[in-house]
Image (cartoon, coloured by chain):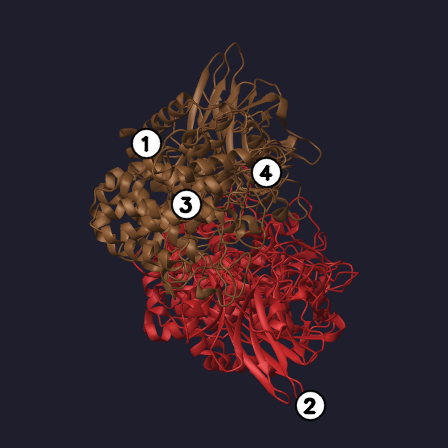
Chain colours: A red, B brown
Amino acid sequence: MGILAKDGDFYSLHGIWGAYASIVLGRLGRGAGVVVGDVQPPKRALFAGYRRGTEKPVLLPFAPDVKVGRGVEAYTGEQAHPDAAAHPEVLPGRVPFEFFGEEDIERTLSLSGETWAAGRMKMNVVSFFGEVPDPASSSKAVLRDRMCPAIYVRLSFDNSGSDSPMVGVFGMQGIRRPLSDANPGRLLGFAHVGEWGFATAPAPGVSEVMDWMAIAAAFSDKPHVMRHLASDGCLRFEVAPGERKEYVVAVGAYRDGVVTAGMRMRSYQATLFRDLDDVLVQAVSRARAALGLADGLDRLLDAAPISGERKFLAAHAVHSYLASTELLADEAGKPVFIVNEGEYQMMNTLDLTVDQAFHELAYSPWTVKNELDFLMARSSYRDAFGIAVTHDQGVADCFSPRGTSSYELPGLTGCFSFMSYEETLNWILIACLYSHNADDGSWLRKNRKTLSGAVESILNRDENGDGIMDRDSDRCAGGAEITTYDSLDVSLGQARNNLYIATKAWAGLVCAASTLDAVGGRDLAARARASAARIAETVLARVVEPEGFIPAVFEGGNQSRIIPAVEGLVYPALCGVAEAVRPDGEYGPFVRALKRHLEAVLVPGVCLDPVSGGWKLSSTSRNTWPSKVFISQYVAENLLGIRDERTARDAAHVRWQCVGCADFAATDQLDSSTGADMGSRLYPRLVSSVLWYKTPTKRGKR
Amino acid sequence: MGILAKDGDFYSLHGIWGAYASIVLGRLGRGAGVVVGDVQPPKRALFAGYRRGTEKPVLLPFAPDVKVGRGVEAYTGEQAHPDAAAHPEVLPGRVPFEFFGEEDIERTLSLSGETWAAGRMKMNVVSFFGEVPDPASSSKAVLRDRMCPAIYVRLSFDNSGSDSPMVGVFGMQGIRRPLSDANPGRLLGFAHVGEWGFATAPAPGVSEVMDWMAIAAAFSDKPHVMRHLASDGCLRFEVAPGERKEYVVAVGAYRDGVVTAGMRMRSYQATLFRDLDDVLVQAVSRARAALGLADGLDRLLDAAPISGERKFLAAHAVHSYLASTELLADEAGKPVFIVNEGEYQMMNTLDLTVDQAFHELAYSPWTVKNELDFLMARSSYRDAFGIAVTHDQGVADCFSPRGTSSYELPGLTGCFSFMSYEETLNWILIACLYSHNADDGSWLRKNRKTLSGAVESILNRDENGDGIMDRDSDRCAGGAEITTYDSLDVSLGQARNNLYIATKAWAGLVCAASTLDAVGGRDLAARARASAARIAETVLARVVEPEGFIPAVFEGGNQSRIIPAVEGLVYPALCGVAEAVRPDGEYGPFVRALKRHLEAVLVPGVCLDPVSGGWKLSSTSRNTWPSKVFISQYVAENLLGIRDERTARDAAHVRWQCVGCADFAATDQLDSSTGADMGSRLYPRLVSSVLWYKTPTKRGKR
């Protein structure tokens, strides 16, 4: 079970759903551990290893030579090292353990987590448990169970065939208290005050070790005295000769009080749990059930008819997405769901939300509704053309003022300009995805006017009647709107007269028309359809013969070739308008032209990178975005019928993550030749890969 | 006003009373800024400087080459640097400003803060406001005023004699939001989410600058567009030609929710203020009154009849003490006062509390009562000899379990062993200091039994009837008790048969007897006096002739000479038993012997360091402790009448702090020859220096 990582030296984020917290680990010899309120790898050691008999202890290589907190030498002045007598092995120059090398380790990913197997141990980190219940329709007991802000580390120690006892260890740096202090007989483990901690149930042969160098003390057989001033804590597991043992450690996070500014919000999970210790007690007690859910998810992905590389990418993406999720409670106690934007920490960046909606519709459709409502209520504005939605809702737990984002600035034509058109379109697309796949009609009926207003606003930005955006928002104040591809060149960066935006607008209008039909908005639906038809005509008129490609931008003599020309086709297929993307359907010529375009650009040196072989979004840029590649791969194979060696470039895409972007978990902007990260590090958006194995709920039914 | 720092390149902590937060600054070219929940200098830049006309801007040297948060290059991928057009000066290789050198700067300390004067600017940090009202007898309005968790930075810019405009700037790295977002028209400034921030009142010519390199943007005259994604924020002040301007910036901190573990406590100030913005609004509005209080304190110290060096040490000590203070609220909302132990972060370390009580009795006597009560209620225990009090109450906001400390461990004879005897004595001494100087009798009547129990417990530890401790607590489990001088050699480190402890025990018994007399405890008082008399006899019998010194430890042939032999004499003098320390009083021979001892050891090469000339607590150790030196200096000069060049070693003591310990603000363990820090960095205890200028309240009345 799971997919072997060929290049196993890369960081993973293992997020705790809704807690804006995660375990970060994976680069050999580099820091690992829990982070809260951010996604950057910590500069601390994580300990996992064992000692058999009198052999030298051996550890997974997550214990860099990093000190946290005060060491004993800060206290002892001119006195002798107080550990010298008890643990001579910790004196300078002595190394009391060895590390497994890369060649000793088998690292495998699965949808629910990942496993490190080395020597006689396995460490399985389990962070994804699938569906998250809707607080609006769930009891507190259910939410305490299924929204418990904790993940698990399952440790196996194999002492079979041995006649000596084995000692297994799991621990972290940065802790400040043993859990047994406040929870005698209930928990063993350690915590960083009330913020994060790891715990297991008391059992024979399991003990806590807190010491200046806890890992050395843990492997000692001498009686242990807890040193409460130390910042290293380990759980110690005794495994008798001949035994195999498995232990489950819960890793939880908790943030008390108001955690935001701009709008006052608490962590929603703080409304369900009294404190971290309450979380850990609950997490320990529900471990078996949670791990059962995880096993089910792993079976789902294992059984999916896709390549191992895609399974790997999908699993890696989910773990990283979870690390950016944050469920807040407003002052009335109502849930507000935020996905933070990886390293950038922007909140509910709407051009990510639309791509993450594929995942959320499969696992937490209510968060999609929550995002739609909160974005419209807090972060919409009116410009000269009508309603528009902002790029994001703030940054780093600081909400930006009503109707503004933390990102958009006037007077620019590149990065940091406004995305009024695309974000409004994104809101429409998410509304259609949600309505079709998760709504019983009530949300749609309630939001019909808002949806209509957004569609009118989109139509108003087409000045010359060709269906395509040609007016920049007046918010730009002389600048020009950009797209989500803000750091790419003009081929994908400029919104006006852009092919990528044209197809996406076509999709938005087609889906909105169908959605509005269902609630009696036939007039506007008809106008939307007419505009969609004009977009199709406009695009068709731009085909360059004899090559058959469509230029990325319909002005300035642009000749760039772009893959995301086809991206928009994904929406009608998932919003109940599959007919619209059939080559022989109403928009057949348009769809066929896009297929021809894609075939024209999926050529080495154009949109297949000549060095790596991976998908390159634009012929004129080496900056490529995996989350978007995944959507276009889905469109190519499932909607356009292109499924061959041109689409099976997944090995290159895995190498990008595991080698080029090894320092940054799931990365969404990288150099298509070298794979080196260029931005969007530690990112949630790559869950668009869910399309490969679990498309939104209703699709299965059709 | 204020005392010039001759060696001006050292860190200061400027604590916010009760908030466990401070501004740290002072090492040239090193990080500076706000820290919350610890005392370590941050690796961030603090900006303070100006530009006159078209001259190159010049800054105080608190802007190290350190990046915080994402830089713009994380966003822009292959696009051009978006600031290149607006601010070409920020491009790599261009340095848009200069720093003042050490020779350009005049740094002066005062009791309320410190001032940096350079060129045409002054920056005055004001962190001490004197008395803190008792929550038990103060209205919420008074507490919001006098317990507002904020300090001030007063900036002066002198553009006189110029016909060009001047731009002054103050800012910090690490902020995430402009205050005007949530407080339009009320505040200008920046905050790190809801945790800390700096603010000023809106006024003409004052504006916010938030940018990737805010300091460059702040000095530009181009219109500024706030970049909410940046982590640098500056306040920009325009000063017209010929003008002199002063601006006051409030710097506040706030911690919401439960901030502790082990016992659930909130920040007390969070019960008075809604959030950080509420703190900053209040701080800005009370600035004038607060600065008036600060001026009064400065006048007090300026007028004190002590050397400039002592004024310097006293001021430095107060600022550092404030950084470790933390006022919590328990679950019933009652205040719990904690002083954290500098770099070690132990909570209410009782052997510090006793020395800090001199300061607290002068400025917040209710905190002394609060400490006495909470230490006895939470952190006392019974060993084989009776009641005893623990070394501390926990570490880093994690309360240790009832009746235990985070420090003490069994089975040891050195650092980390138990301090049962000395800590119990400390509690008695604080109870006596509080009763005599701040109590109307009610606390004493309520706690008479507890005080009696503690005295009985001390008496029980003298097995052979010589008055001196000779039984180690059974908690030591075979080890031996130590003293507060845990990292010193045996001369001060061992509790049993120790001269320092003997004098302190004598003082505790003398003071307790007087205190018990007042509440009808005459039997025990008589026994305490008898034991005190036996201590005096025992010590007298140990005088070594003809030198006249008394060895530090009355066993093992020890011949160390120690200054703290006299330390205990301070207590009777401050507890209404001044008669006991008169050379012609009841204990005259003992007092005269101690004076003779001190004269015998205050000799170069014995307890005057042969290299630095500073006071060396033990002849056999170079590890000396300024907080304790200060007390013994007070005893020598004010009680024993030794006031000459042997006691006037303050210049060396200043050099220890400003040169040897430059990295660690007030440091309390250092090498007496080199001044290099050996431990107890960033420490609160040096406020024992308050004895030089403001002894406890009742003393003035006698």
Give the class, few, some or many, for how many residues have Cα within 10 Å of label 4's Cα (few <14, many ≥20). Answer: many
Nearer to us: label 4 or label 2:
4
Q: Is residue A578 above or below residue B364?
A: below
Dot 4 or dot 1, earlier in sequence: 1
Q: Which mark is residue B536?
A: 3
Q: Is residue A375 left or right of residue B225?
A: left
Amino acid type at circle 4 is Cys
Q: CA distance from mark 2 to mark 3?
A: 70 Å
- Do the residues marked 4 and 2 share a common chain? no
Indicate the secondary structure of the residue bearing disc 3.
Answer: helix
Dot 3 or dot 4, earlier in sequence: 3
Residue A576 visible at all: no
Q: Residue furthest top?
A: B161
Judge by depth and name the residue closer to the eye, B324 or B162.
B324
User: Looking at the rendering, which quadrant does residue B264 occupy?
Assistant: bottom left
Indicate the secondary structure of the residue bearing disc 1.
Answer: helix
Q: Which residue is mark 4?
A: B661
User: Image point 60% across, 71% down: which residue?
Assistant: A218
Judge by depth and name the residue closer to the eye, B546 or A197.
B546
Amino acid type at circle 1 is Ser
Give the class, few, some or many, for how many residues have Cα within 10 Å of label 2's Cα (few <14, many ≥20). Answer: few
Residue A629 visible at all: yes
Q: Which residue is mark 1?
A: B285
The residue marked by circle 2 belongs to what chain? A
User: Image point 53% across, 35% down: which residue?
Assistant: B25
Q: Is residue A367 above or below residue B69?
A: below
Q: CA distance from mark 4 to mark 2?
A: 57 Å
Nearer to us: label 4 or label 1:
4
Q: CA distance from mark 3 to mark 1?
A: 57 Å
Q: CB of mark 3 within 8 Å of CB of mark 1?
A: no
Residue B639: x and y in percent read 41, 32
